[in-house]
Amino acid sequence: MAAHRPPAGGNQTLVATAERQYVVQEHRREQQVHWDLMLQLEQTLATWQAPAPPRDWPGRPWPCRKLPDHRLAYLTYQGPIRGGRGEVRIVARGTYEPLEEGQQLWRARLSGDLRGGLDLTRQRDDQWQMTFNGEVA
């Protein structure tokens, strides 16, 4: 998958760290809203679109959609998205320990604003199920 282009003004300097970071952004466009969960890989962010905010995630499975990988600039970016694609704001961030990363299952332990276990299980094509067993700060 090709990575999204960086946001306007997206020349972000990231501090080198051995820990992988995650971010959840609220993405608003006109009257629609969804939340993007992004997990740092080496040079990109694996990204899933969720229908509900992180405060609703614990204790039940949520359908989500795998999106193309995003650029690392989105770890810190907040503001308008070029091309009239709405605005994003960060609602949760932290670090994660990858436990499993595959074509059918991603499993991680999150620390930070979200604390606990995260499972992403592929259902078909770009449709996944997200289960978060933890708490939201």
Image (spheres, grey):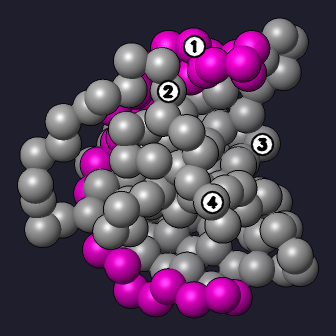
Mark 4: amino acid: Ala
Q: Name the residue tied to disc 3.
A: 51
Query: Dot 2: few (<14), some (14–19), or many (≥20) neighbours within 10 Å?
Result: some
Q: Name the residue tied to disc 2.
A: 7
Magenta stretch encompasses residue 74: no
What's drawn in magenta, residue-wise?
Answer: 75-104
Spot occupied by residue 65 in the image (x, y as percentages of width and height): 78, 58
Mark 3 vs mark 4, foreground winner is 4
Left or right, 56 with reference to 110: right
- The CA distance from mark 1 to mark 4 is 21 Å
Kindly check if marks 1 and 4 are in contact, taking CB atoms under 8 A apart as contact: no
Tell me what residue is drawn at x 53 percent, y 50 percent.
70
> Circle 3 sits in a helix, a strand or a loop, which is it?
loop
Left or right, 80 with reference to 93: right
Query: Dot 3: few (<14), some (14–19), or many (≥20) neighbours within 10 Å?
Result: some
Left or right, 108 with reference to 120: left
> Circle 1 sits in a helix, a strand or a loop, which is it?
strand
Indicate the quadrant where residue 76 lies: top left
Whether residue 124 is visible here, answered yes or no, is yes
Which numbered disc covers residue 80? 1
- The CA distance from mark 1 to mark 2 is 8 Å
Mark 1: amino acid: Pro
Q: Name the residue tied to disc 4.
A: 2
Label whose residue precedes the other's in the sequence (4 or 2)? 4
Kindly check if marks 1 and 2 are in contact, taking CB atoms under 8 A apart as contact: yes
